[in-house]
Image (cartoon, grey):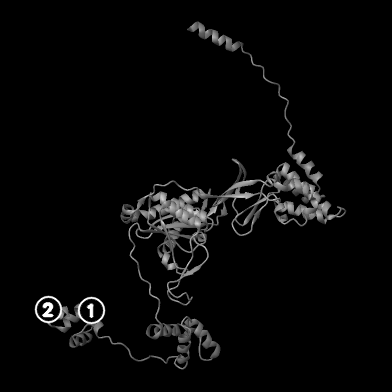
Amino acid sequence: MQEMAKHGHVGRAAVKADMDRKTARKYVAAGRLPSEMKTERAWRTREDPFAEHWPLIVAMLEETPELEAKTIFEVLVEKHADRYQDGQLRTLQRHVRQWRAAEGPEREVFFPQEHRPGEAAQTDFTNDDELRVTIGGELFVHLLCVFVLPFSNWQWVTVCFSESMAALRRGVQSALFRLGRRPQFHQTDNSTAATHNIVTTAVGPTSPMDPTASTKRPFNAEYLALMRHFGMTPRTIEVGESHQNGDVEASHGPLKRRLEQALLLRGSRDFESREAWEAFAQAIADKGNRGRHDRLGQELAVMRVVDVAKLPEFTVLDVRVTEWSTIRVKPCAYSVPSRLIGARLRVQVFEDRIVARLGEDVQLDVERLRGDRKRRIDYRHIIWSLVQKPAAFARYRYREELFPSLSFRRAYDAIHEATGGGGEVKRDLEYLRILHLAATHLEADVETALDLLLRDNRPIRADAVKALIATETRIDVPNVAPPVVDLVGYDALLTAQAVAS
């Protein structure tokens, strides 16, 4: 068209446009561009395979709008196997999609929100098993607690083991002290760390079907105390409406991708400790925050300074030692030395461990159990009483905890399988005496002795184990005469110094 406007010669214009002269003449005669000459096709090129059963399909969609096209197709194939093949699924999906757009029910609309600088922060937990991080060569099963400022998308991360209040407290504190500022609101989902059971509040009618009714979970006292300490107002999303926490939810994917790329560059996924892995993850979060400096500056300008002390990263419980020589911390049981039976201990419950004290003296410092009704029983705490009451061992509730390793379990089985060993109580006593040796000597030495006896098919007896331990641990101390020190040389040295002066 440009060439025709210059000189009006169709042939020359067609050559310039790299087009056949007949085609060029057609477009010149029409006076329109090729894209303007295309028309919508109003006819089908092939017969619609679902025309016969389309009224049935529409009826199913109107009755149950949540049905997927694949489910409907499976119903059709089951009823009319001779009419439909797998290759027609895409055609039905396209038909259903067009029907939903033209005649389907109204769909929920999501409204993008304008975030205000420094107004709120969002916190959420995410699983990062796909990163396959190891600590000392062992797979490290954990979560990440992620803190985000929605306006600037500034992000901070801490490593934790569960969605507990201790983990939430640590994650929030770490982020706030990193910023040095605090927002007006702090928002979480309905995790048990921050909220309790569901209650329904309503304005006006209280019917569960009333649209004015709002399903909320009230906040825990510990979480409210954390918010009061930092001067933030807590708020949460509606139950089942995770999109309301969308900014922090959306940040999980990019964060994990950055961590994955950083691990690939590092060349190893193994770290020496949890602290080393957390420092690595926080360094990656810091790199991601560099591009958010301008908007973060707007937030910091309106946020209040963090002018309070950091809260202890543990809660304190006052527990009594039971007659079983155990304490119960949260839903789990831990054994303590039997001399503490009846005493009250002050237990510091950290996110990853518990520390039990009598006064200021530490009586127990162990890794915290995660889960419901688990137990950690140390045989050293109770073996003295069990040796005196061997009949209690057979039905002891925590008996399985008294096999420190597979070697001890095999030794116990060998004792009970041996002939001529007396009754069950006497055989249990034999094993308890071996366990007593492990408590009074080195467990590793007793385990080695048991492995030797099992390997040689010798009877497993406490006396035999004790004899092997004595042989293994005997040390020949050489008889060395004490050195005689001659001080005459020192006297001569002092005398020479006096003359020189």
Residue 452 seen by the camera: no
- What amino acid is found at the position of numbered circle 2 in the picture? Lys
Picture quadrant where residue 480 is located: top right
Which residue appears at 61% of the width and 48% of the height? Answer: 366
Labelled disc at residue 18: 1
Q: Position of residue 484 (x, y in %)?
A: 67, 17
Disc 1 crowd, CA 10 A, few/some/many (<14, 14-19, 20+): few
Which comes sooner in the sequence, label 1 or label 2? Answer: 2
Which residue appears at 55% of the width and 11% of the height? Answer: 493
Q: Please, what secondary structure does the residue beneath circle 1 have?
A: loop
Most distant residue in the front direction: 204
Against 382, residue 492 (above or below) is above
Most distant residue in the left direction: 7
Against 114, residue 329 (above or below) is above
Which residue appears at 52% of the width and 53% of the height? Answer: 166
Residue position marked by numbered label 2 in the rendering: 6
Against 25, residue 364 (above or below) is above
